[in-house]
Image: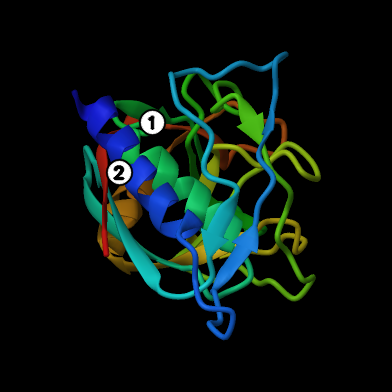
Amino acid sequence: MKLRWGLAVLSVLGALVAAPTPASASVPLVRCTFTPTPSNPAARPVVRPLPLALTRGTVDVTFRFNYGPVTVRLDRGRAAPCAVHNMVSLVLQRFYDRSQCWRLSNSARLGVLQCGDIYEVEKGGPGYQFPDEVSGSETYPRGTIAMGNQGPGTNGSEFFIVHSFANIPANYSVMGRVIRGMSALDRMVEDGIIPTDPNGPLDGAPAKPVKIQRATAAW
């Protein structure tokens, strides 16, 4: 029933986007390309987002972790409207509900929580991918939420939230910032990391499992 409700919402949004507008009207839309990945099918049943994204306004998404809620404000007017559009679509379709965040890092180079992969780190996406939206000037201070990827143009469902800072190249589409709940991420870090990544002992699985119980969107 929840999936049907989410699809109904997407259908309504599609009708609004497709509605004719006066020639003089300035339509705040950008075209997005969501390409199916048959060799990497969807980990959960979802439909691809509509190929048009709004470029105005914000959306607040709340991830209800087992550590407490974290609310991020996604900004359509910044550099990554397609990424915002995609995340809202996945939230409405309950893709992130009852999923686990497989990676936590806390090194001098990288301090992030990585989520959005259903099976394990970088495995279990939505069955499609879309291009990066970066200008080359992106930075990733504490509280940033950005798309994760496995190389250029491989965005899907993976994302990360910066709990300290991330001294990384500007290769990741920035969607917005945390507006409430950073203390929940701090507690995750305090509980420690099980090193599983070759990058070092402060990069691996959270010592205590981090789970997204539910994700919701509000306008």
Question: Residue shown at 70%/23% (left/top)?
Answer: 37
Residue 24's x, y, as percent? 57, 86
- Residue picked out by circle 2: 9
- Extreme-bottom residue of the structure: 24
Report the disc number at residue 95. 1
Q: Quadrant of residue 70?
A: bottom left
- Reply above or below: 174 against 129: below
Q: Earlier in the sequence, mark 2 or mark 1?
A: 2
Residue 166 appearing in the image = yes
Residue 161 appearing in the image = no
Residue 47's x, y, as percent? 48, 29
Residue 176's x, y, as percent? 47, 67
- Reply above or below: 30 against 150: below
Callout 2 secondary element: helix
Question: Residue shown at 37%/34% (left/top)?
Answer: 96
Q: Amino acid at mark 1?
A: Phe
Compare residues 45 and 181 and report the one nearer the observer: 45
Compare residues 25 and 151 and report the one nearer the observer: 25
Residue 49 relative to residue 110: left or right: left
Q: Amino acid at mark 2?
A: Val
Compare residues 103 and 22 and report the one nearer the observer: 22
For the C terminus, the image quarter is bottom left
Report the disc number at residue 86. none
Callout 1 secondary element: loop
Circle 2 residues within 10 Å: few <14, some 14–19, many ≥20: some
For the N terminus, the image quarter is top left
